[in-house]
């Protein structure tokens, strides 16, 4: 490191090479210090930094380590490794003559329909033992394919009542479903439709009880195919999706900010470039009657686990974001960005007291490779990140009260968040184009048709 000049000229700061050398020498201490919470209020940071810079007895290395161990205004470039994951895109090569049905079979292979046909026949036989149904006969994989195809048609061509699809009057004849199924046969398959044998599932509240036993085999197969058939981009988004259901269910959720407010919550990892769902996890509520601790962090780590070490960038909202989670991801060469609640443990004190009056104003604080940014739009927006240097600024257009448009400065982290956080919302938008679910008292059937 260059020696300090004996002249009384003002100190001009450290070079990046000096900072990196200091980091290497104090790496073992830094890991311990990263776990410590800061006691320094943001309003006091400038005073503390002046004292450190004016202290002639402090060495250069100690100054750098202090900046790494606490929140500071001295923002330095963030260390980000290159993305080393597989080339984004489909993993299976299809001939030009393939149609949509062939792509569907990549996610829903033949074995799934064979298993559904087997379980449907078994469940029908069990029900007929107690209540005779002379019109029922065993189904097969081919008929189950046709049944699910008909369910998709029912979602595309809407009718006030299901019976109208079998009307003889051509004015109301919406589809060709009746050429494959009589109304009685279609309703029988709906009645006996089953995807798993739940007889071996332990009773509720017993060890080993699976709340998702009705769809577990199908769920596991679909999770495997969606992972295997597509490699995601560097950027991934994690958020919650809702499957509408208003009946009685122990793990039914209420999310007032979602278009579908009541139903089954599903944690989703999606590709923000196209809305493809790469992985998902059904939320089944409390564990043995107690709320799960650090639920958001656990979900992100579960969904991102298979991608550790590849240099992915994760985008999530304030439910998931925390300094502890982002540090754990960073140690796995996985970088993150998200809005953050100001009361999260490990953030600098006083964030909620910051007063930014002008639109476009911002402040940045950094601790190691964690960066927190507060930007003024119509209100203060707080983001935590490890995937970009918040010193970089962009310009965004904002409409003023008089109707004019004004260019205001905006941290790069805000622009990246707005660009890549919409992956799950994109998937929801595509899914809402047609609804394959039909009214049922069975909650798991709504989940089944979500997978389509």
Image: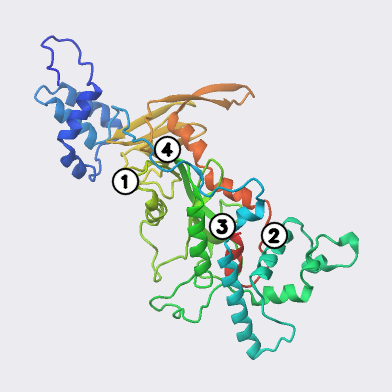
Image coordinates for residue 261, horizontal then vertical, percent = 58, 57
Q: CA distance from mark 4 to mark 2?
A: 42 Å
Crowdedness of circle 3 by 10 Å Cα count: few (<14), some, many (20+)? many
Neighbours of disc 2 within 10 Å: few (<14), some (14-19), many (20+)? some
Name the residue carrying label 1: 332
Near mark 4 (Cα within 10 A), the count class, few <14, some 14-19 or many ≥20, is many
The mark closer to the camera, 3 or 4, is 3
Disc number for residue 107: 3
Instruction: Compute the Cα span from label 3 to label 1.
Output: 29 Å
Tell me if label 3 and label 4 are in contact, CB under 8 Å.
Answer: no
Which is more N-terminal, label 4 or label 3?
A: 3
Mark found first going from the N terminus, 3 or 2: 3
Q: State the image coordinates of residue 421 (x, y, percent, origin top left).
A: 50, 42
- Along the horizontal axis of the image, is 292 left or right of 441? left
The answer to whether residue 426 is above or below residue 253 is above
Residue position for label 4: 382
Residue 211, percent across and down? 48, 71
Q: Nearer the viewer, residue 88 or 377?
A: 88
Give the Cα distance between marks 4 and 1: 24 Å
Which is in the foreground here, disc 4 or disc 2? 2
**SS class, disc 2:** helix
Mark 4 secondary-structure assignment: strand
Which mark is first along the chain, 1 or 4? 1
In this rendering, would 21 be left or right of 207? left
Q: Is residue 438 visible?
A: no
Q: Residues within 10 Å of mark 1 (few under 14, many from 20)?
A: some
Do callouts 3 and 2 mark residues in contact (Cβ within 8 Å)? no
Looking at the image, is 219 positioned above or below residue 139? above
Farthest residue, direction left? 57
Q: Quadrant of residue 413?
A: top left
Reading the image, the residue beneath label 2 is 152
């Amino acid at each position: 490191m260059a020696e300090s000049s004996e002249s009384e000229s003002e100190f001009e700061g450290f070079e990046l090479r000096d900072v990196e050398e200091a980091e290497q020498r104090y790496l073992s201490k830094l890991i311990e210090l990263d776990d410590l919470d800061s006691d320094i209020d943001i309003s006091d940071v400038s005073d503390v930094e002046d004292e450190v810079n004016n202290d002639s007895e402090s060495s250069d290395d100690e100054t750098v380590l202090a900046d790494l161990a606490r929140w500071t205004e001295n923002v330095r470039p963030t260390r980000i490794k290159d993305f080393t994951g597989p080339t984004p895109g489909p993993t299976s090569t299809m001939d030009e003559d393939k149609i949509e049905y062939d792509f569907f079979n990549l996610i829903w292979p033949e074995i799934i329909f064979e298993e559904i046909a087997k379980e449907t026949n078994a469940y029908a036989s069990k029900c007929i033992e107690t209540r005779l149904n002379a019109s029922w006969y065993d189904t097969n994989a081919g008929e189950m394919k046709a049944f699910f195809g008909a369910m998709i048609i029912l979602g595309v061509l809407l009718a006030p009542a299901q019976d109208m699809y079998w009307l003889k009057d051509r004015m109301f004849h919406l589809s060709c479903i009746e050429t494959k199924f009589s109304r009685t046969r279609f309703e029988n398959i709906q009645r006996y439709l089953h995807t798993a044998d739940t007889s071996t599932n332990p009773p509720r509240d017993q060890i080993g009880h699976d709340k998702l036993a009705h769809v577990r085999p199908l769920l596991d197969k679909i999770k495997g195919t969606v992972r295997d058939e597509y490699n995601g981009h560097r950027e991934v988004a994690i958020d919650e999706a809702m499957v509408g259901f208003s009946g009685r269910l122990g793990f039914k959720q209420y999310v007032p900010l979602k278009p579908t407010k009541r139903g089954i919550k599903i944690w989703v990892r999606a590709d923000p470039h196209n809305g493809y769902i790469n992985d998902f996890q059904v939320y089944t509520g409390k564990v043995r009657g107690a709320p799960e601790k650090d639920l958001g962090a656990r979900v992100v780590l579960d969904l991102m686990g298979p991608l550790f070490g590849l240099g992915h960038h994760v985008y999530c909202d304030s439910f998931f974001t925390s300094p502890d989670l982002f540090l754990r991801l960073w140690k796995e060469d996985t970088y993150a960005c998200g809005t953050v609640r100001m009361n999260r443990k490990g953030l600098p004190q006083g964030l909620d007291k910051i007063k930014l009056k002008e639109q476009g104003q911002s402040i940045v604080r950094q601790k190691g490779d964690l960066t927190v940014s507060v930007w003024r739009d119509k209100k203060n927006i707080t983001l935590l990140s490890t995937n970009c240097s918040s010193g970089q600024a962009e310009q965004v257009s904002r409409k003023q009260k008089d109707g004019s448009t004004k260019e205001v400065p905006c941290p790069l982290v805000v622009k990246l968040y707005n660009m890549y956080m919409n992956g799950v919302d994109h998937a929801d938008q595509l899914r809402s184009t047609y609804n394959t679910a039909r009214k049922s008292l069975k909650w798991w059937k709504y989940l089944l048709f979500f997978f389509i």
